[in-house]
Image: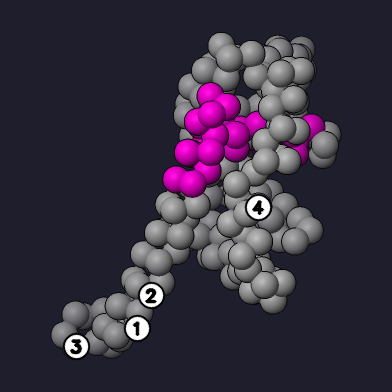
Amino acid sequence: MDKSTGSNYDSKLVEHYFHLWTLLGRARDAIYRAREVNLRKFGITPEQLLVIIVIKDLALAGIPATPSEIARRTFRTPATISISASRMMLKGLIKRSAKRKNSNKKLLELSLTKLGEDMFRQLRQREITTKIMSSLSKEQEEQLVSCMKTLIVAAVNEIGQKEYEKVVQSVLTEKD
């Protein structure tokens, strides 16, 4: 125990981890900002691109792309996803359809329109993050993937909500 702070952790170790935390945040913010500037020419935000990517991934996996499922996979709230989805519908990128899950429950499912599919293909080919991420060597990339998976699992364990178990499993089993 660190007597000066009353913490179970040594203050130098706490400072070290705080530095790593802020460095990780800065890297994420810088990449996000570069992506945001790049996406502005297409009239969408990084959040909207994330929704497009998750809808596409869920469709490929045969899983209904409900606002709740998208929220779970992006660590956002369903309300945040619904707001983003509404804006995307106005742009003609996605559509919403009501399907019956069982006799008395309606399931709202989101899917990409032709324009959304075209946007996905176009952005995938011009993705700014490819330029940024390609600055890593293969070894650095593998280390980063391993570290990110470890951090996601640790964060989800800290959140302690069972709803994220499927997300963790998909993160751990997705190809690198």
Disc 2 residue crowd, few under 14, some 14–19, many 20+, Cα 10 Å: few
Q: Amino acid at mark 4?
A: Thr
Q: Of callouts 3 and 2, which one flags the residue occurring earlier in the amino acid sequence? A: 3
Q: How far is the residue under mark 3 from the one under mark 1?
A: 14 Å
- Look at 52% across and 43% down and name the residue there: 35
In front: label 1 or label 4 = 4
Which portion, as a residue range, is magenta? 33-59
Q: Which residue is mark 4?
A: 130
Res 124 → quadrant:
top right
Is 23 in front, or is 153?
Answer: 23
Q: Secondary structure at mark 3?
A: loop
Look at discs 3 and 2 and give the one toward the viewer. 2
Between the C-alphas of marks 4 and 2, the distance is 28 Å
Amino acid marked by disc 1: Leu
Between the C-alphas of marks 1 and 2, the distance is 6 Å
Query: Residue 38: where, in percent of width, then height?
Result: 53, 38
Amino acid beneath label 3: Lys
Determine which residue is flagged by label 1. 13
Q: Is residue 149 visible?
A: no
- Mark 3 or 1 closer to N-term? 3
Residues at marks 1 and 2 touching, judged by CB atoms closer than 8 Å: yes
